[in-house]
């Protein structure tokens, strides 16, 4: 027995030595990777350590380390506050709207673009619809305020065409329309760019399937339903997993650029809420707790969707 | 008989897609036309097919504000220095981790992958950046986002798709890894380098929330923040002096806002047609599942 553990240890030692020799031989390779590894440790794992603030009564002067532990008190305070409940509810509602309307938009658009026969028109449409992706939300916020303004915008004129000229309101300041504006502007900005992947996938579908369908007299609609959509399935599922995993990330840059005090009631989301908690009320601990809650829900959603996707189709999922 | 409905359908499809392109472009057109119209005539609103009169006063007013030059130079610094650091660090991490004999490759890759699923969030990151003394410096916009895990995986997958003999033979000949990367690997990886540089570049140009979070001094503003302060016009300190001189000149608040929007997005719009195809390639390279 003694003897065998001895050889085992010696075996282990020589394996370690071998590894060290291998590392020394390639030391520049390891040195090259070092800044990147340090970056992830400091700027990603560092903040994960900083999450302990969520369980402390954070005091700026005492710092993360010496502030007092309070257990789950921050979470309790958060879940009881009406501001957090409102932000959570808004986030979930906007998230559902996005899943329902924003997610399918590029699928529909790519199927439409794919049906275009004239190559130049197709190229033109593609070039145009990709464009808004390259514009900052701040700029889009400015543009929306400009064209939706009841006085200097186009709303009045368009409403006049339909004989609704008397009922024009400030859409950006309307609690009734604000979420619709969020959804519509998301589609306007990203649906085009989102078609790139789908269009590339459609190209890989075997053309003989369409030929056979035509011979059988299948209509265009049936071809799309029975050939194009099934051909897109894997892509759709993978993107759906990412989308659901980001369910609570409903777009901080977008909302912060578009909203204003008149629509806080319907537009305040978790991200903007925690920003205000920290930087307007200096409640860093509550804000961190709120962020941790969001991250945990996000993680659960990704893992769950991935699991579900694998159950349905063994090849899909990404973990 | 069969042909007729198809042609009708095609006409309808083209009409619908035509509407989509108009709806996509009109908002930009509106702002551009408004910004060069005579401010008094523009103020009545409505659709703009052509400028109403022609006046560039709002632009001259805008560029009389010295803050916009600070904003331009900060944005350009962020764009070029930031993207350079992004691409260099991403490549320097992706290349070693794409080589099979690299010890610890799997755990390190998993470590990076996990950051895509879970993160510390806004406040702990802010506290860290603050603790490192980066708040209110332009480095706060560059260092905390030096490598995107997403782009790292795109690049790593691309490197893994290259024939391993490239690296192995260079290694046999005694070339240092840095030399191998720059002289052998990068030249054959231009598509992925271009795509990733563009992803980072567009992100740097358009991002603004990190600037809201980390930058406080007026002369540190980036262009997107400058636009933001312009949109909240009369309330903002930085534009108060402008407001006074505007009441005498033939300029409206609205017109100056429109001019600012155009000035903010113009650089991107000008280079967009030339870069578009690289983006499409980039998205497709990235989509190859690893």
Image (spheres, coloured by chain):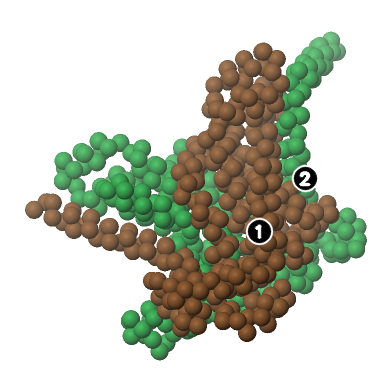
Quarter of the picture holding the C terminus of chain B: top right
Estimate the x, y position of residue B5 in percent, counting from the top left: 16, 56
Q: Nearer the viewer, mark 2 or mark 1?
A: 1
Query: Can see residue B70?
Result: yes
Q: Residue at x 66, y 80 (%)?
A: B245
The mark found on residue B72 in the picture is: 1
Chain at tag 1: B
The mark found on residue B157 in the picture is: none
Count the marks: how many? 2
The residue at which mark 2 appears reads as: A42
Q: Residue at x 68, y 34 (%)?
A: B93
| A18 shown above or below A238 | above
Q: CA distance from mark 2 to mark 1?
A: 30 Å
User: Residue B264: which quarter of the image?
Assistant: bottom right
Q: Secondary structure at mark 1?
A: helix
Q: Secondary structure at mark 2?
A: helix
In the image shown, does B229 or A244 lie closer to the viewer? B229
Estimate the x, y position of residue A24 in percent, counting from the top left: 79, 20
In the image shown, does B190 or A297 lie closer to the viewer? B190
Q: Residue at x 61, y 54 (%)?
A: B205
- Chain ID for green: A
User: Residue B84: which quarter of the image?
Assistant: top right
- Chain ID for brown: B
Determine the residue located farthest toward the bottom in the rendered image: A166
Q: Residue at x 62, y 28 (%)?
A: B98
Query: Can see residue A178?
Result: no
Estimate the x, y position of residue A87 in percent, counting from the top left: 63, 70
């Amino acid at each position: 027995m003694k003897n065998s553990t001895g050889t085992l240890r010696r075996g282990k030692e020589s394996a370690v030595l071998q590894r060290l020799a291998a590392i020394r031989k390639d030391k520049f390779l390891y040195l090259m990777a070092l800044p990147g590894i340090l970056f992830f440790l400091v700027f990603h794992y560092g903040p994960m350590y900083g999450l302990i603030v969520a369980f402390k009564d954070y005091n700026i002067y005492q710092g993360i380390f010496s502030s007092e532990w309070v257990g789950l008190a921050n979470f309790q305070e958060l879940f009881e506050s009406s501001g957090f409940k409102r932000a959570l509810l808004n986030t979930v509602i906007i998230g559902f709207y996005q899943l329902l309307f924003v997610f399918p938009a590029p699928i529909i658009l790519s199927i439409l673009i794919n049906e275009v026969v004239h190559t130049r028109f197709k190229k033109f449409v593609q070039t145009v619809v990709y464009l808004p992706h390259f514009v900052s939300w701040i700029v889009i916020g400015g543009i929306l305020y400009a064209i939706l303004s009841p006085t200097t915008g186009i709303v009045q004129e368009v409403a006049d065409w339909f004989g609704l000229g008397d009922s024009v309101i400030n859409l950006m300041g309307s609690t009734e329309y604000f979420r619709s504006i969020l959804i519509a502007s998301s589609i306007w900005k990203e649906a085009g760019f989102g078609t790139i992947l789908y269009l590339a996938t459609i190209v890989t579908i075997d053309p003989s399937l369409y030929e056979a369908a035509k011979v059988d007299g299948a209509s265009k609609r049936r071809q799309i339903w029975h050939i194009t959509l099934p051909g897109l399935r894997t892509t759709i599922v993978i993107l759906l997993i990412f989308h659901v995993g980001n369910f609570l990330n409903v777009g901080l840059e977008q909302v912060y650029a578009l909203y204003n005090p008149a629509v806080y009631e319907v537009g305040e989301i978790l991200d903007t809420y925690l920003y205000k908690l920290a930087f307007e009320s200096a409640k860093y601990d509550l804000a961190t707790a709120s962020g941790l809650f969001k991250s945990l829900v996000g993680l659960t959603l990704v893992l769950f969707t991935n699991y579900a996707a694998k159950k349905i189709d063994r090849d899909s999922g990404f973990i | 008989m069969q042909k007729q409905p198809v042609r009708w359908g095609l006409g309808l499809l083209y009409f619908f897609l035509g509407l989509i392109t108009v709806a996509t472009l009109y908002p930009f057109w509106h702002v551009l036309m408004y910004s060069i119209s005579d401010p008094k005539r523009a103020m009545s609103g409505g659709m703009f097919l052509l400028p109403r009169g022609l006046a560039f006063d709002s632009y001259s007013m805008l560029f009389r504000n010295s803050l916009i030059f600070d904003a331009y130079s900060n944005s350009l610094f962020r764009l070029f220095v930031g993207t350079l650091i992004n691409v260099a660090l991403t490549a320097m991490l992706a290349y070693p981790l794409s080589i099979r004999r690299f010890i610890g490759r799997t755990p390190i890759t998993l470590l990076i992958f996990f950051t895509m699923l879970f993160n510390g969030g806004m406040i702990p990151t802010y506290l860290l950046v603050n603790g490192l003394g980066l708040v209110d410096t332009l480095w706060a916009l560059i260092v905390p986002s030096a490598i995107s895990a997403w782009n790292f995986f795109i690049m790593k997958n691309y490197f893994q798709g290259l024939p391993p003999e490239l690296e192995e033979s260079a290694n046999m000949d005694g070339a240092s890894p840095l030399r191998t990367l720059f002289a052998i690997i990068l030249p054959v990886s231009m598509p992925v380098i271009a795509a990733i540089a563009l992803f980072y570049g567009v992100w740097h140009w358009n991002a603004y929330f990190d600037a809201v979070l980390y930058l406080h001094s007026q002369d540190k503003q980036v262009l997107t923040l400058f636009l933001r302060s312009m949109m909240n016009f009369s309330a903002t300190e930085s534009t108060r002096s402008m407001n006074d001189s505007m009441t005498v000149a033939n300029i409206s608040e609205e017109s100056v806002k429109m001019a600012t929007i155009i000035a903010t997005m113009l650089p991107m719009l000008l280079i967009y047609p030339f870069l578009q195809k690289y983006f499409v390639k980039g998205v497709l390279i990235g989509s190859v599942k690893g």
